[in-house]
Amino acid sequence: MQIRTVETEKDLMKFIKFQWKVYKNDPYWVPQLISDIKKLLNKNKNPFWKHSEQRLFLAENNGEIVGRIAGVIDRNYLEFHNEQTGFFAFFEAMNDYSVAELLLSAVENWLKEKGMKKMMGPTAPSTNDELGFLLEGFDSPPVLMMPYNPEYYHGLAEKYGLKKDKDLYAYQITEKTVPMERLNRLNEKIKRREPKLTIRQVNLKDYDNEIKRIREIYNNAWGKNWGFVPWTEEEFYYQCANLKPLVVPELVFFIYIGTEPVGMLVGVPNYFEVLKKLNGKMGPVELIKFLWYKNRIKTLRIMIMGVKKQYRNRGIEGIMFYEIVERGIKLGYKTAEMSWVLEDNIAMCRAAEMMGGKIYKKYRVYEKTL
């Protein structure tokens, strides 16, 4: 068995397509588009790599790929958190500890050479992207932009010496469990208390300016959260441009107090329901499938919700919860996932429960002192 770095386009395709081997018989795995993964890893197309380094590794046994991993160093993370932490990312391996050990030690050694004092992960590639190993909830598929993995990954990680850093929760909300009357009463009460409060859905014709408003709220609302790294302006525009074709305007809206945008919520249809049928490709046949199935999605993901620090504890979150539930039901969605929520973010956990949400998936982020 040996480990080697990805150096060629052929190696990169082996790195990407190895997932199909790991999940060959898994009914819940959803393959992402190969073209999207290539774009994510491309140093010339993804602006994340302008302030970050990557090293991709493949594990081989007699010429057969048996595992993959990436080492990532995000200089913006180092500066913002003032700690020398690097990441292991895109981890996939067969159920063999010797493979996991080879992969994780390769990243650990690389991070040490770069002066890192701690290794954290898994990421894909940063804490602003897919994060953690699925810990609970292996009996259903993941939703859009959430990770999925075999259950045995935790045993491999812990045997290597990785320790829990943080658990993340995903709440499931259904139209049958939402206490609409209670939310409606709360909604009306808050609106009476905040007469200058208005709600406006995103304007896709003014998307560039909308992105500026979203970034302003995002960086203010999440600034002190665990794992948070401010997006650069270029990164944020890049991510929002990728997201624009997936946006349903009714599910993305702002809360204003007077003329100031103070809160936002971003809900997105669970396009994983469609990607499940495409097997990582997007040719003419797959495009027809995509256009056919995208209007039949029954699940949405509440992926971003935030209120500026100075406007918290005024019930604005409750207004947004009511709005997304009411709009989602009108549009025909039967289920919503609110994710991810930090295990120790008590206020957000209680808010999810107030909406009738139940924890149905958990994710774990690991760390190791180097």
Image: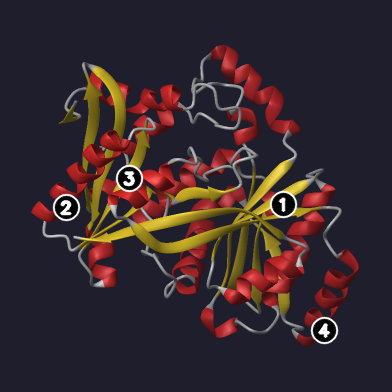
Which colour assignment does the render follow? Answer: secondary structure
Residue in the picture at 35% in, 30% down:
38
Residue indicated by mark 2: 111
- Secondary structure beneath dot 2 equals helix
The answer to whether marks 1 and 2 mark residues whose Cβ atoms lie closer than 8 Å is no
Mark with earlier residue (4, 2): 2
Q: Amino acid at mark 1?
A: Glu
Mark 4: few/some/many CA within 10 Å (<14, 14-19, 20+):
few
Mark with earlier residue (4, 1): 4
Q: Is residue 231 visible?
A: no
Residue in the picture at 54% in, 67% down:
343
The percent position of residue 272, horizontal first and vertical second, equals: 60, 35
Q: Amino acid at mark 2?
A: Leu
Q: How many badges with numbers are in the image?
A: 4
In the picture, the disc for residue 250 is 1
Residue at far left of view: 113
Q: Amino acid at mark 3?
A: Ala
The percent position of residue 324, horizontal first and vertical second, equals: 73, 58
